Each structure stands twice: as C-alpha cells, then as structure tokens.
C-alpha cells in the first residue's frame, strides 16, 4: 500500500474512533442524566421536561448494543447519576419521591445489565446486608439506603423489616466479608439494635456494622460498638467507598 493511502486510512480510522468515543460519552452522560432526574423509560411522563425522550431503560439497552461494556455503563453512567441524587438529597435539594424515581430508573437500566452480573463479567464492589432491626417496621429510609448502595455498585441483600439477630448473623456468616447495615426508627428498637450489634460482634468480631435511622447519634453508635453511623444514604455510600478504596 502506498504511504499516502496508508496515512489517509490512519486519519480516517482516528476520526472514526474519535466519533465513536464522542457517541459513547454522550450516551453515558444521557444515561447518568436519566438516573439523576428519574427518567425511567420513554413512556414515563416524569420528569415533564423529558416527556417522550428515551429513558434509562432504552439508553442502557442502546449502550449495550453499541458495544459499551456493562461495567462501564454501571460505573460511568448509572453510578455518577445516583451519586448526584445522593448529594442533592443530603442537601435537601430533592426529596423522597424524586429519589424513588431515580431508583426506579436505575432498576430499569439494571434489568439489561443483570445477565452480565450473573455471568460474573461485571464484579460488584462487595455485598451489603441490610435490615430494619427486630420490632421495627419502618422501611422507607432503609429502602432508600438500600437503593443508593445498590446504585453505587454493591450487591445488596435486603432482609426487610423486623429482622432478628439470628437472621442477620446467619446471613453475615453465609456471606463472608459482607458489610452489615442496620436501621432503627424507634427509641424502643434502638435497644434491639444495641443487642444485635453486641451479638454480631461477639460471634464475628471483624464484622463491619454500619447503623442509621432518625433517632440515632454518633455517640449512640460508639456506645453500642458499631463501626459507623450515617445520618443519610449518601454518608453510607461514602463510607462503603472507603472500605474498598
Ligand atoms: Co412511625 N414513628 N410508628 N410509622 N413513623 C415515627 C418514627 C415517629 C417519630 C412518629 C412520631 O411520633 N412523631 C415515632 C417514633 C417515636 C420514637 O420512638 N421516638 C413513630 C411511632 C411511635 C410509631 C408507632 C409506635 C406508632 C403506633 O403504632 N403507635 C408504630 C411502630 C410500628 C413498628 O415499627 N413496630 C409506627 C408505625 C408507622 C407506620 C407503619 C404507620 C409508618 C411506617 C411505614 C413504613 O416505613 N413502611 C410510620 C411512619 C411513616 C413514620 C414517620 C411518619 C416517617 C418515617 C419515615 O419513613 N421517614 C415517622 C415520623 C417522622 O419521621 N416524621 C414515624 C422518611 C425516611 C426517608 O426517613 O426513616 O429517618 P428515615 O430514614 C432516613 C435516615 O434516618 C437515614 O436515611 C434515610 C434517608 O435520609 N437512615 C439510614 C435510615 N436508616 C438508615 C440506615 C443506614 C444509614 C442511614 O445505614 C444502615
């Protein structure tokens, strides 16, 4: 091949490659935007200013079709969107309903990525076992924490509400190196939380336990021997990040 032709082909390849990168970046940015603003799919009327546009559902599928890796879609599209929601929620710039819409958008995208997680192609950051402590039926806050942590790339095992110490211990033992998260909303069930943490630490001294819930304080966390207290989901996400850094 002539040198001139070779040079032209090289520049064609570079410009094609640049275009592809641009398309990929735009797609991931759009995906992140859908998560941040809770755009589930094209049919969803929310948010009103994105009516009729593709949502997380269509864009995640499109990204896979364009050959973008499932891990890149998660880490460069979905996670940054969820992170923005977490920060805005902490700063009272968005509220529970908006976070729930973001979580729904995240789930719609995750449907397409799930097979890649199942095949082991995409690695999760770790396992997070969460539950509301025994005697406590409040789960709205716990669910938000659970969704945000899943959205940050962890596999979440959600045991629900009114979770006994025995169930938590059994799950922690079955999932070595997991992090346990406990939520309590009642002053009465804070005592159950203390009891649960004590028993977990007695049987599994190295088990990391993260606690949260409206009546808790960091002093209470220290008193009961848990490793970390977060007043909000974003704090929990940031703490987990430090464990895998
Ligand atoms: Co209940 N309730 N409730 N309740 N309830 C409270 C908590 C209460 C403060 C209301 C009041 O009296 N002002 C009061 C507790 C008083 C106290 O103990 N000091 C109370 C009571 C007394 C009760 C009952 C005993 C009432 C009765 O039957 N007499 C009863 C108890 C039932 C039981 O649990 N055994 C009861 C029942 C219920 C409902 C079932 C009706 C319902 C729960 C529905 C559900 O969760 N599916 C309910 C609700 C909705 C509330 C209020 C109104 C709202 C709680 C909530 O969801 N907040 C609440 C009053 C209030 O807070 N205004 C109240 C929104 C949620 C996003 O916030 O859960 O704090 P929160 O979660 C936050 C943070 O705390 C943090 O992140 C979340 C997002 O920012 N966080 C974590 C939570 N868990 C975390 C874990 C982490 C990290 C962060 O790491 C693991």
Image: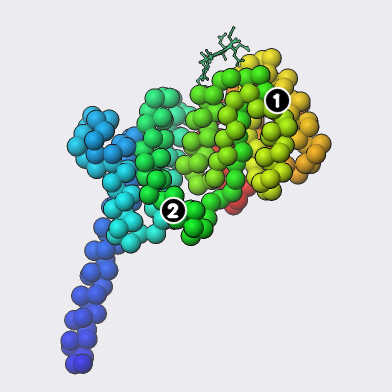
Q: Nearer the viewer, mark 2 or mark 1?
A: 2
Question: Which x, y percent locates residue 166?
Answer: 73, 32
Using the image, determine if residue 157 lies above or below residue 189.
below
Where disc 1 sits, the SS reads: helix
**Residue bearing the label numbered 1:** 193
Image quadrant containing the N terminus? bottom left
- On residue 182, which mark appears? none
How many C-alpha atoms fall within 10 Å of the one at disc 2: few (<14), some, or many (≥20)?
few
> What residue appears at the point 52 percent right and 39 percent down from the top-left corner?
149
Decide if ligand 1 comes within 8 Å of the CB at mark 1. no
Where disc 2 sits, the SS reads: helix
- Whole-Å distance between the Cαs marked 2 and 1? 36 Å
How many C-alpha atoms fall within 10 Å of the one at disc 1: few (<14), some, or many (≥20)?
many
In this view, the residue in front, 38 or 81, is 38
Left or right: where 233 falls relative to 208: left
Give the image quarter of residue 80.
top left
Mark 1 and mark 2 in contact (Cβ < 8 Å)? no
> What residue appears at the point 68 percent right and 45 percent down from the top-left corner?
174
Q: Can the viewer see residue 208?
A: no
Q: Can the viewer see residue 237?
A: yes
Give the image quarter of residue 63.
bottom left
**Residue bearing the label numbered 2:** 115
Using the image, determine if residue 32 lies above or below residue 47.
below
- Figure colour scheme: rainbow
Question: Which x, y percent locates residue 97?
Answer: 39, 25
> What residue appears at the point 39 percent right and 45 percent down from the top-left corner?
111
In this view, the residue in front, 161 or 144, is 161
Question: Which x, y percent locates residue 225?
Answer: 76, 32
Image mark count: 2
């Amino acid at each position: 091949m002539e040198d001139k032709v070779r040079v032209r082909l090289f520049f064609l390849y570079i410009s094609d490659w640049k275009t592809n990168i641009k398309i990929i970046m735009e797609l991931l940015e759009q995906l992140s935007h859908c998560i941040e603003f809770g755009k589930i799919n094209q049919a969803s009327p929310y948010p009103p200013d994105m009516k009729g546009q593709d949502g997380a559902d269509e864009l995640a599928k499109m990204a896979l079709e364009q050959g973008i890796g499932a891990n890149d879609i998660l880490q460069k599209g979905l996670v940054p969107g969820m992170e923005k929601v977490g920060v805005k929620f902490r700063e009272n710039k968005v509220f529970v309903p908006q976070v729930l819409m973001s979580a729904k958008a995240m789930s719609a995208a995750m449907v397409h990525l799930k097979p890649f997680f199942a095949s082991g192609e995409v690695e999760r950051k770790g396992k997070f076992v969460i539950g509301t402590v025994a005697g406590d039926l409040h789960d709205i806050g716990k669910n938000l924490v659970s969704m945000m942590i899943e959205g940050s790339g962890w596999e979440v095992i959600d045991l629900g509400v009114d979770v006994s110490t025995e169930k938590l211990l059994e799950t922690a033992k079955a999932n070595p190196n997991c992090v346990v998260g406990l939520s309590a909303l009642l002053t009465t069930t804070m005592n159950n939380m203390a009891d649960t943490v004590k028993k977990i630490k007695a049987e599994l001294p190295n088990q990391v336990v993260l606690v949260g819930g409206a009546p808790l304080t960091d002093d209470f966390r220290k008193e009961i021997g848990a490793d970390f207290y977060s007043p909000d989901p974003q704090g929990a996400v940031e703490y987990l990040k430090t464990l895998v850094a």
